[in-house]
Image (spheres, grey):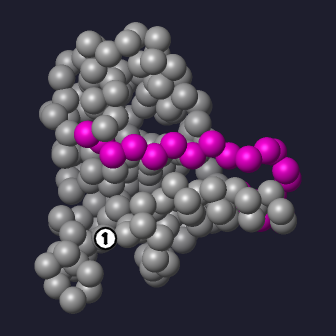
Amino acid sequence: MERSHAALERFDERTPLIYRKPIELPDDVHQWIAGWGGSSLFLTGAIGVGKTHTAWRTCRRWLEAWYAPSRPWSGGPDIRTFRSTALFDALRPDGPDEIRRTLVTELQKCDLLFIDDLAAAKASPWTQERLFEIFDERYINRRPVIVTCDVLPTELSDITGPRVSSRLAEMCGDSVVLLEGDDRRKGVAA
Protein backbone atom coordinates (compact mmCIF):
# COMPACT_ATOMS: atom_id res chain seq x y z
CA MET A 1 0.00 0.00 0.00
CA GLU A 2 2.85 2.39 0.84
CA ARG A 3 4.57 1.65 -2.47
CA SER A 4 1.47 2.39 -4.49
CA HIS A 5 0.79 5.59 -2.57
CA ALA A 6 4.35 6.83 -3.12
CA ALA A 7 4.26 5.88 -6.82
CA LEU A 8 0.94 7.67 -7.34
CA GLU A 9 2.25 10.76 -5.56
CA ARG A 10 5.36 10.80 -7.79
CA PHE A 11 3.21 10.43 -10.89
CA ASP A 12 0.87 13.22 -9.74
CA GLU A 13 3.87 15.53 -9.19
CA ARG A 14 5.02 14.89 -12.79
CA THR A 15 1.55 15.46 -14.20
CA PRO A 16 1.08 18.99 -15.61
CA LEU A 17 -1.21 21.03 -13.34
CA ILE A 18 -3.99 21.36 -15.89
CA TYR A 19 -4.32 17.56 -16.17
CA ARG A 20 -4.37 16.74 -12.44
CA LYS A 21 -8.10 17.34 -12.15
CA PRO A 22 -9.96 14.00 -12.13
CA ILE A 23 -12.25 13.47 -15.11
CA GLU A 24 -14.64 10.72 -16.10
CA LEU A 25 -13.02 8.33 -18.56
CA PRO A 26 -14.94 6.74 -21.45
CA ASP A 27 -16.04 3.12 -21.00
CA ASP A 28 -13.65 2.03 -23.78
CA VAL A 29 -10.75 3.42 -21.76
CA HIS A 30 -11.88 1.62 -18.59
CA GLN A 31 -12.04 -1.61 -20.61
CA TRP A 32 -8.53 -1.01 -21.94
CA ILE A 33 -7.15 -0.45 -18.42
CA ALA A 34 -8.86 -3.62 -17.19
CA GLY A 35 -7.55 -5.65 -20.16
CA TRP A 36 -3.89 -5.77 -19.08
CA GLY A 37 -2.87 -7.29 -22.38
CA GLY A 38 -0.17 -6.02 -24.64
CA SER A 39 -2.56 -3.81 -26.54
CA SER A 40 -2.09 -0.10 -26.91
CA LEU A 41 -4.57 2.76 -26.71
CA PHE A 42 -5.12 5.40 -29.37
CA LEU A 43 -7.16 8.46 -28.39
CA THR A 44 -8.34 10.51 -31.33
CA GLY A 45 -10.71 13.40 -31.94
CA ALA A 46 -10.84 17.04 -32.85
CA ILE A 47 -8.59 19.63 -31.26
CA GLY A 48 -9.63 20.53 -27.72
CA VAL A 49 -11.92 17.58 -26.94
CA GLY A 50 -9.76 16.40 -24.02
CA LYS A 51 -7.49 13.74 -25.53
CA THR A 52 -4.43 14.76 -23.54
CA HIS A 53 -6.35 15.09 -20.26
CA THR A 54 -7.91 11.68 -20.89
CA ALA A 55 -4.48 10.17 -21.59
CA TRP A 56 -2.90 11.57 -18.40
CA ARG A 57 -5.83 10.27 -16.32
CA THR A 58 -5.60 6.92 -18.13
CA CYS A 59 -1.90 6.66 -17.24
CA ARG A 60 -2.80 7.34 -13.62
CA ARG A 61 -5.58 4.74 -13.60
CA TRP A 62 -3.21 2.27 -15.32
CA LEU A 63 -0.72 2.92 -12.52
CA GLU A 64 -3.43 2.35 -9.90
CA ALA A 65 -4.33 -0.95 -11.60
CA TRP A 66 -0.65 -1.96 -11.61
CA TYR A 67 -0.71 -1.88 -7.81
CA ALA A 68 -4.02 -3.74 -7.48
CA PRO A 69 -3.92 -6.33 -4.67
CA SER A 70 -4.87 -9.07 -7.14
CA ARG A 71 -1.68 -8.52 -9.20
CA PRO A 72 1.51 -10.19 -8.04
CA TRP A 73 4.20 -7.70 -7.01
CA SER A 74 6.62 -7.15 -9.86
CA GLY A 75 8.23 -3.87 -8.89
CA GLY A 76 7.17 -0.38 -9.78
CA PRO A 77 6.36 0.38 -13.40
CA ASP A 78 8.30 2.76 -15.61
CA ILE A 79 5.90 5.18 -17.33
CA ARG A 80 7.38 7.59 -19.89
CA THR A 81 5.43 10.56 -21.23
CA PHE A 82 6.42 12.75 -24.17
CA ARG A 83 4.82 15.48 -26.21
CA SER A 84 5.61 14.49 -29.80
CA THR A 85 7.39 17.75 -30.58
CA ALA A 86 9.76 17.27 -27.61
CA LEU A 87 10.31 13.63 -28.55
CA PHE A 88 11.14 14.45 -32.17
CA ASP A 89 13.49 17.19 -30.97
CA ALA A 90 15.26 14.71 -28.67
CA LEU A 91 15.64 12.24 -31.54
CA ARG A 92 17.26 14.72 -33.96
CA PRO A 93 20.47 13.49 -35.59
CA ASP A 94 22.50 16.54 -34.56
CA GLY A 95 22.15 15.80 -30.82
CA PRO A 96 24.57 13.72 -28.76
CA ASP A 97 24.42 10.13 -30.03
CA GLU A 98 24.82 8.57 -26.58
CA ILE A 99 21.86 10.52 -25.16
CA ARG A 100 19.68 9.69 -28.17
CA ARG A 101 20.61 5.97 -27.99
CA THR A 102 19.83 5.89 -24.27
CA LEU A 103 16.47 7.57 -24.85
CA VAL A 104 15.50 5.15 -27.62
CA THR A 105 16.40 2.18 -25.41
CA GLU A 106 14.43 3.58 -22.46
CA LEU A 107 11.38 4.19 -24.65
CA GLN A 108 11.62 0.70 -26.11
CA LYS A 109 11.67 -0.95 -22.69
CA CYS A 110 9.51 1.17 -20.37
CA ASP A 111 6.32 -0.44 -19.11
CA LEU A 112 4.02 2.23 -20.57
CA LEU A 113 4.83 4.92 -23.13
CA PHE A 114 2.51 7.90 -23.65
CA ILE A 115 3.12 10.08 -26.73
CA ASP A 116 0.92 13.16 -26.88
CA ASP A 117 -0.30 14.80 -30.08
CA LEU A 118 1.62 12.57 -32.48
CA ALA A 119 0.44 14.34 -35.63
CA ALA A 120 1.64 17.75 -34.37
CA ALA A 121 5.32 17.04 -34.96
CA LYS A 122 7.11 17.35 -38.28
CA ALA A 123 9.07 14.20 -38.93
CA SER A 124 12.20 13.68 -40.97
CA PRO A 125 13.38 10.36 -42.41
CA TRP A 126 15.82 10.20 -39.49
CA THR A 127 13.06 10.68 -36.91
CA GLN A 128 10.90 8.08 -38.67
CA GLU A 129 13.75 5.57 -38.38
CA ARG A 130 14.09 6.26 -34.64
CA LEU A 131 10.31 5.94 -34.21
CA PHE A 132 10.47 2.62 -36.02
CA GLU A 133 13.15 1.43 -33.58
CA ILE A 134 10.94 2.41 -30.64
CA PHE A 135 7.63 1.11 -31.97
CA ASP A 136 9.00 -2.09 -33.48
CA GLU A 137 10.58 -3.13 -30.18
CA ARG A 138 7.38 -2.31 -28.31
CA TYR A 139 5.34 -4.13 -30.96
CA ILE A 140 7.29 -7.39 -30.88
CA ASN A 141 7.38 -7.40 -27.07
CA ARG A 142 3.74 -6.32 -26.64
CA ARG A 143 4.54 -3.28 -24.53
CA PRO A 144 1.65 -0.80 -24.46
CA VAL A 145 1.62 2.71 -25.84
CA ILE A 146 -0.94 5.45 -25.33
CA VAL A 147 -1.09 7.88 -28.23
CA THR A 148 -3.19 11.01 -28.63
CA CYS A 149 -3.69 12.31 -32.13
CA ASP A 150 -6.23 14.15 -34.23
CA VAL A 151 -6.03 11.56 -37.03
CA LEU A 152 -6.47 7.77 -37.04
CA PRO A 153 -3.47 5.40 -36.78
CA THR A 154 -3.87 4.40 -40.44
CA GLU A 155 -3.51 8.08 -41.45
CA LEU A 156 -0.15 8.62 -39.76
CA SER A 157 2.18 7.40 -42.52
CA ASP A 158 3.37 10.89 -43.47
CA ILE A 159 4.47 11.54 -39.90
CA THR A 160 5.60 8.18 -38.57
CA GLY A 161 6.31 6.34 -41.81
CA PRO A 162 4.26 3.40 -43.10
CA ARG A 163 5.99 0.75 -40.95
CA VAL A 164 5.16 2.53 -37.68
CA SER A 165 1.66 3.39 -38.86
CA SER A 166 0.99 -0.27 -39.68
CA ARG A 167 2.33 -1.52 -36.36
CA LEU A 168 0.45 1.11 -34.41
CA ALA A 169 -2.81 0.20 -36.14
CA GLU A 170 -2.34 -3.44 -35.09
CA MET A 171 -1.10 -2.57 -31.60
CA CYS A 172 -4.23 -0.52 -30.92
CA GLY A 173 -6.64 -2.90 -32.66
CA ASP A 174 -10.04 -2.32 -31.08
CA SER A 175 -8.62 0.24 -28.66
CA VAL A 176 -9.03 3.30 -30.87
CA VAL A 177 -11.25 5.68 -28.94
CA LEU A 178 -12.90 8.66 -30.62
CA LEU A 179 -13.48 11.54 -28.21
CA GLU A 180 -16.14 13.96 -29.34
CA GLY A 181 -17.33 17.35 -28.21
CA ASP A 182 -16.57 21.02 -28.46
CA ASP A 183 -13.16 22.58 -28.05
CA ARG A 184 -12.94 22.85 -24.25
CA ARG A 185 -10.46 25.68 -24.48
CA LYS A 186 -13.01 27.87 -26.26
CA GLY A 187 -16.04 27.13 -24.13
CA VAL A 188 -17.28 26.77 -20.61
CA ALA A 189 -16.19 23.13 -20.41
CA ALA A 190 -12.59 24.28 -19.92
Q: Start and end of the magenta stretch? A: 65-85
Q: Quadrant of the C terminus?
A: bottom left
Q: Write the residue at 58% across / 36% down.
A: 110
Residue placed furthest toward the bottom: 188
Q: Amino acid at mark 1?
A: Gly
Q: Quadrant of residue 17?
A: bottom left
Relative placement, left or right, of 75 versus 117 is right
- The image shows residue 31, relative to residue 93, as above or below, that is below
Total marks drawn? Answer: 1
Q: Residue 101 appears at what percent x and percent y? A: 46, 16
The residue located at (47%, 70%) in the rendering is 20
Position of residue 91 measured from the top left corner of the image (x, y, whole percent):
33, 24
Mark 1 element type: loop
- Up the image or down, 145 lies above or below 12; here it is above
Which residue is rendered at x = 26% and y = 39% of the image? Answer: 85
In the rendered image, which quarter is residue 132 located in? top left
Residue 187 forms part of the magenta stretch: no
Quadrant, the N terminus: bottom right
For disc 1, the marked residue is 50
Q: Position of residue 117 (x, y in %)?
A: 27, 50
Q: Position of residue 189 (x, y in %)?
A: 26, 86
Is there any visible trace of residue 169 in the rendered image?
no
185 displayed left or right of 144: left
